[in-house]
Amino acid sequence: MKRKTREQKAIESYIDSNGSRCVYCKSKNIEGGDTEFDGSKIFQNCRCNACDKEWTETYSLTGVNLEEPIPEPPNSIRFIKSLRKGKTNEDTVNTLAKEK
Ligand SMILES: [Zn+2]
């Protein structure tokens, strides 16, 4: 197994600190600047006021919070799907009739 480079270690501990300590000198005196979208990634320029170094944080899409639940498909779509599954028309019509 390859040894981690100094850079990799510094980045890992930066992520562990949730980006609260400078990658270079571990100072908490850091600030985030402009953010930039690029497809499913966001980049944020960061700067340390203690050692004057700069770096860029990268964020990626990891999840979605829904505003409202995803609706049930209408009966017509369920009908078509059940046809595809090989159910007979009669069974499906009976099932749909029971649901009403
Ligand atoms: Zn620093």
Image (tube, grey):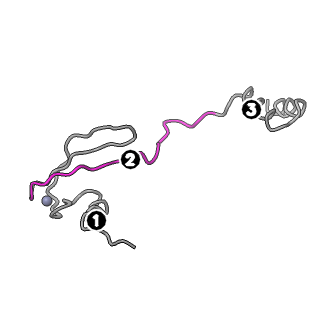
Instruction: Give the residue drawn at x 15%, y 62%.
Output: 27
Image coordinates for residue 69, horizontal then vertical, percent: 56, 37
| Sequence-wise first label, 2 or 3 | 2
Instruction: Give the residue drawn at x 90%, y 30%.
Output: 90
| Sequence-wise first label, 1 or 2 | 1
Q: Which amino acid, mark 1? A: Ser
Residue in the foreground of this view, choosing between 67 and 10: 10
Q: Confirm or reject: label 1 Cβ below 8 Å from ligand 1.
A: no
Residue 68 is a magenta residue:
yes
Span highlighted in magenta in the image:
50-71
Instruction: Give the residue drawn at x 30%, y 59%.
Output: 15
Q: Which amino acid, mark 3? A: Arg
> Residues under labels 3 and 1: Cα distance?
50 Å
Q: Which residue is mark 2?
A: 60
SS of the residue at dot 3? helix
> Residues under labels 1 and 2: Cα distance?
18 Å
Q: Which residue is mark 3?
A: 78
Density class for disc 1 (Cα within 10 Å; few <14, some 14-19, many ≥20) is some
Quadrant where the C terminus sits is: top right
> Residues under labels 2 and 3: Cα distance?
35 Å
Residue 74 located left or right of residue 83: left
Quadrant where the N terminus sits is: bottom left
Occupied quadrant, residue 30: bottom left
